[in-house]
Image (cartoon, grey):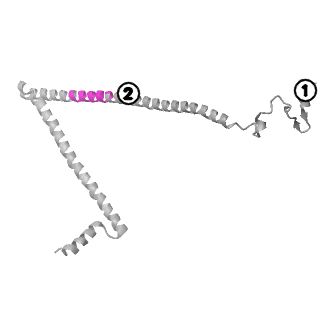
């Protein structure tokens, strides 16, 4: 016979005999002896296992937070680089436009000066730059004055239209508007206007 079946003599017809084993390789103090299922972990083991995972969870959370912070830092650095590049580009563009305007105005001024020197003689060259400067400054002043008047007129028209629309909506909703109510109140307080 096989050695595996050698302790079968210690068993009775209804299970193990007192002081013997169940016939397997494990003693009677296994999980079966307490009445618990072998698949159910013991509370102490479950707690130990959960505490072991808490450290792992903390590490994963720390890793996630560090990755997010580094992502925000990288975005801020990229934003800073693009901002500096934008400022440098804006300065370069303004410089190019300014130089083009200076060259254009200077060329026109010199051309007018040469024209006045040709018409009136050698001492009249200065008249070209002077007239061009006056023309540019006058044009700027006129543009600013016209722009301010237009802006004020358009702003006032928008404001009047806004309140006229509100009064129209009040008449639709309530049958009267705020101006009509104010006129009625004035008439009750001070009497009708002559």
Q: Residue shown at 92%/30% (left/top)? A: 9
What residue does disc 2 label? 81
Question: What element does badge 1 sit on?
Answer: helix
Q: Give the quarter of the image for residue 169.
A: bottom left
Q: Give the quarter of the image for residue 100.
A: top left
- Residue 53 locus on image (x, y percent): 60, 32
Q: Residue shown at 29%/58% (left/top)? A: 161
Residue 151 horizontal side relative to residue 22, left or right: left
Question: What element does badge 2 sit on?
Answer: helix
Q: Are there few (<14), some (14-19), or many (20+) residues within 10 Å of tag 1?
A: few
For residue 46: magenta?
A: no
Q: Nearer the viewer, mark 2 or mark 1?
A: 1
Q: Earlier in the sequence, mark 2 or mark 1?
A: 1
For residue 97: magenta?
A: yes
- Residue range in magenta is 88-102
- Residue 67 locus on image (x, y percent): 49, 30
Q: CA distance from mark 2 to mark 1?
A: 83 Å
Q: Residue shown at 29%/28% (left/top)? A: 91
Q: Residue shown at 30%/67% (left/top)? A: 177
What residue does disc 1 label? 6
Q: Main secondary structure of the magenta part?
A: helix
Residue 66 horizontal side relative to residue 1, left or right: left
Which one is in front, 182 or 30? 30
| Image height of 31 relative to 183, above or below | above
The quarter of the image holding the C terminus is: bottom left
């Amino acid at each position: 016979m096989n050695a595996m079946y050698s302790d079968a003599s210690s068993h009775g017809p209804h299970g193990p005999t007192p002081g013997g084993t169940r016939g397997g390789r494990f003693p009677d103090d296994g999980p079966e002896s307490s009445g618990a299922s072998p698949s159910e972990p013991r509370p102490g083991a479950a707690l130990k296992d959960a505490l072991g995972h808490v450290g792992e969870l903390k590490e994963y959370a720390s890793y996630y937070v560090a990755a997010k912070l580094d992502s925000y830092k990288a975005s801020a650095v990229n934003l800073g680089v693009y901002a500096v590049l934008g400022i440098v580009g804006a300065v370069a563009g303004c410089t190019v436009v300014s130089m083009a305007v200076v060259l254009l105005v200077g060329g026109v001024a010199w051309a007018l000066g040469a024209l006045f020197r040709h018409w009136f003689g050698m001492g009249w060259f200065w008249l070209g730059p002077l007239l061009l400067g006056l023309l540019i400054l006058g044009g700027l002043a006129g543009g600013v004055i016209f722009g301010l008047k237009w802006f004020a007129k358009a702003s006032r028209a928008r404001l009047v239209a806004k309140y006229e629309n509100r009064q129209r909506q009040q008449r639709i909703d309530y049958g009267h508007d705020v101006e009509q109510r104010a006129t009625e109140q004035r008439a009750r307080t001070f009497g009708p206007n002559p």
